[in-house]
């Protein structure tokens, strides 16, 4: 068994079970990947991928376990390859953060600025996406941490560290009638609504609140970026239900906000790690600065409880 063979398996899985796409990404030939896959399956004694003729349809049940183990192994290899540099300089390297637009725009700037000043030799990389997408990036080893809200799919190789709640507010144009009324769900439902995209917890938590009240709001627009939602509120397209942190009275001219945390369940910001993440000193420092309660000892203990590494 070779590490290269496991790498091929992960690339095939990553590229939607398309051998040609995996070969292109690896700059190698499709027959070469097929041959190495056959050798690995022969050695293991079972098929990793289910096939119809020469077409891969997906993972077999044993194949799912192979992918999980291969992800851990390749993550350990990556950590091992960087160990020499880490021992020589604990404050130098690259920290890749997969995060959502809300976190990148409204939460992280308060942490990133001081961190970059104190760790000038750490190169920060931000990769933005929806909550499920950033978990996929992290699970695939394309990010060191992920920062976002709740997701519905399970990611068993990831450890969730709760950080803080994100209560909600209604955003309205200045002078809108809702601002002079008692804020209730029936009152909000009288007007067109702008919400987060359905891939975000802010969408389905708002939906759930209305459903429990027996109401069906008219959603005229959904977006993944709070800034985009506010643009259309300013145009008069409707009211928006967003997290409070996305409203800045200094910059959001022409808009007003009303607290709505009594009507809608808050989302929770989670910092996510792979169970076998190598905890570089500057990674632990960034986590602690983002969520002060997450001390290095707490992070190590949480990973240990999840069956991961402690260092």
Image (cartoon, rainbow, N blue to C red):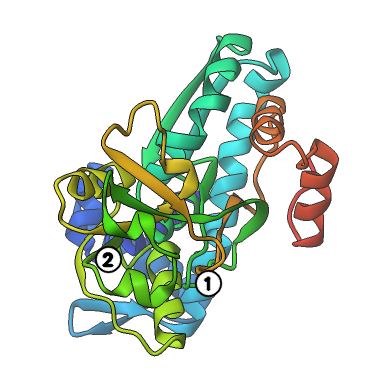
The quarter of the picture where residue 284 lies is top right
Q: Residues within 10 Å of mark 2 (few under 14, many from 20)?
A: few
Camera-nearest residue between 122 and 228: 228
Camera-nearest residue between 69 and 253: 253
The quarter of the picture where residue 80 lies is top right
Whichever of labels 1 and 2 marks the residue nearer the N terminus, that label is: 2
Task: Give the left or right position of residue 102, taking residue 304 as reference.
Answer: left
Position of 84 relative to 178 (above/below)? above
Q: Nearer the viewer, mark 1 or mark 2?
A: 1
Position of 206 relative to 174 (above/below)? below
Q: What residue appears at the point 55 percent right and 55 percent down from the top-left corner?
A: 167
Q: What residue appears at the point 46 percent right and 77 percent down from the top-left corner?
A: 209
Residue extending furthest bottom?
214
Position of 19 relative to 154 (above/below)? above
Task: Give the labeled residue for mark 2.
Answer: 16
Total labels: the figure holds: 2
Q: What residue appears at the point 37 percent right and 56 percent down from the top-left corner?
A: 180
Q: Position of residue 109 (x, y in %)?
A: 49, 26
Task: Give the labeled residue for mark 1.
Answer: 154
Q: What residue appears at the point 34 percent right and 69 percent down from the top-left corner?
A: 188
Residue extending furthest front?
180
- Cα distance in 3D space between marks 1 and 2: 18 Å
Quadrant for the C terminus in the image? top right
Q: Position of residue 34 (x, y in %)?
A: 27, 64
Q: Position of residue 248 (x, y in %)?
A: 41, 34
């Amino acid at each position: 068994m070779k590490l290269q063979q496991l790498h091929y398996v992960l690339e095939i899985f990553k590229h939607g079970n398309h051998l040609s796409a995996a070969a292109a990404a690896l700059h190698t030939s499709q027959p070469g990947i097929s041959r190495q896959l056959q050798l690995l399956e022969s050695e293991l004694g079972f098929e990793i991928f289910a096939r119809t003729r020469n077409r891969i349809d997906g993972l077999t049940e044993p194949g799912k376990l192979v992918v999980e183990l291969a992800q851990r192994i390749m993550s350990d290899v990556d950590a091992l390859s960087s160990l020499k540099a880490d021992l020589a300089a604990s404050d130098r390297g690259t920290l890749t953060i997969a995060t959502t637009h809300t976190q990148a725009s409204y939460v992280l700037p308060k942490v990133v600025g001081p961190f970059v000043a104190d760790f000038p030799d750490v190169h920060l990389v931000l990769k933005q996406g929806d909550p499920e997408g950033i978990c996929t990036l992290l699970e695939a080893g394309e990010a060191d941490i992920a920062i976002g809200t709740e997701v519905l799919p399970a990611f068993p190789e990831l450890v969730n560290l709760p950080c803080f709640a994100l209560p909600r507010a209604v955003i309205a144009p200045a002078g809108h009638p809702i601002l002079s009324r008692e804020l209730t769900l029936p009152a909000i439902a009288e007007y067109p609504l702008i919400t987060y995209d359905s891939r975000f917890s802010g969408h389905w938590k708002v939906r759930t609140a209305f459903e429990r009240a027996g109401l069906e709001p008219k959603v005229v627009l959904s977006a993944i970026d709070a800034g985009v939602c506010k643009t259309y509120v300013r145009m008069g397209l409707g009211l928006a239900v967003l997290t409070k942190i996305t409203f800045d009275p200094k910059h959001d001219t022409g808009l007003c906000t009303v607290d709505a945390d009594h009507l809608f369940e808050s989302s929770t910001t989670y910092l996510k790690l792979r169970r076998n993440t190598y905890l570089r000193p500057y990674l632990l420092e960034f986590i602690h600065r983002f969520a002060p309660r997450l001390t290095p000892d707490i992070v190590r203990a949480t990973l240990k409880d999840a069956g991961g590494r402690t260092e």
